[in-house]
Amino acid sequence: MMLEQGDWRVNAACRDKNPDQLFVRGAEQRKARTICFGCPVRTECLAEALDKKIEFGVWGGMTERERRALLRRRPDVRNWRELLEAAREDYTRSDAYQLD
């Protein structure tokens, strides 16, 4: 079954966390990012934040500043979800080849 774009949240590592932990400033953002490491839907989360240009909070392991910088570096990208999912598939495929 294919999940709709918003449905990824049910599998998010942060789903049971207090939102105030993810919408922090300064050095606290580094701490908040650790929740994202190993999250099974990190790519979908980051793609949503980039596609919707969400300005606040940690999304997909990236801070506000990191996302703004990425958007400035890649103004040509119209669909971050497609780009990030394709990159994940390429990485998974190349990782599988290395195991052979």
Image (cartoon, rainbow, N blue to C red):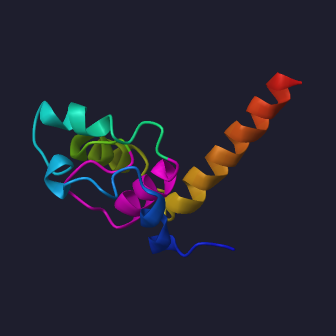
Q: Quadrant of the N terminus?
A: bottom right
Q: Residue at x 59, y 61 (%)?
A: 82
Q: Residue 27 is drawn in which quadrant?
A: top left
Please tell me whether residue 1 is drawn above or below residue 81 in the rendered image.
Answer: below
85 lies left or right of 73? right
Residue 41 location (% of width, % of height): 50, 53
**Residue lying farthest front?**
16
Q: Residue at x 31, y 47 (%)?
A: 67
Q: Quadrant of residue 99?
A: top right
| Magenta residue span | 40-60
Percent coordinates x, y for residue 33 in the rendering? 30, 38
Q: Is residue 79 magenta-colored?
A: no
Image position, residue 52 (x, y; %): 34, 67
Q: Farthest residue in the right direction?
A: 100
Query: How many numbered marks have been drawn onto this rendered protein structure?
Result: 0
Depth check, front residue: 41 or 68: 41
Q: Is residue 11 left or right of residue 30?
A: right
Does 64 sit above or below residue 53? above
State the image coordinates of residue 30 (x, y, percent, origin top left): 23, 31
Identify the residue shown where x is 51% and y is 64%.
79
Q: Tell me: residue 27, above or below residue 14.
A: above
In the shown orientation, is residue 89 left or right of residue 7? right
Q: Nearer the viewer, residue 10 or 29?
A: 10
At a point 56% along the width and 51% down the height, the residue shown is: 84
Quadrant in which the C terminus appears = top right
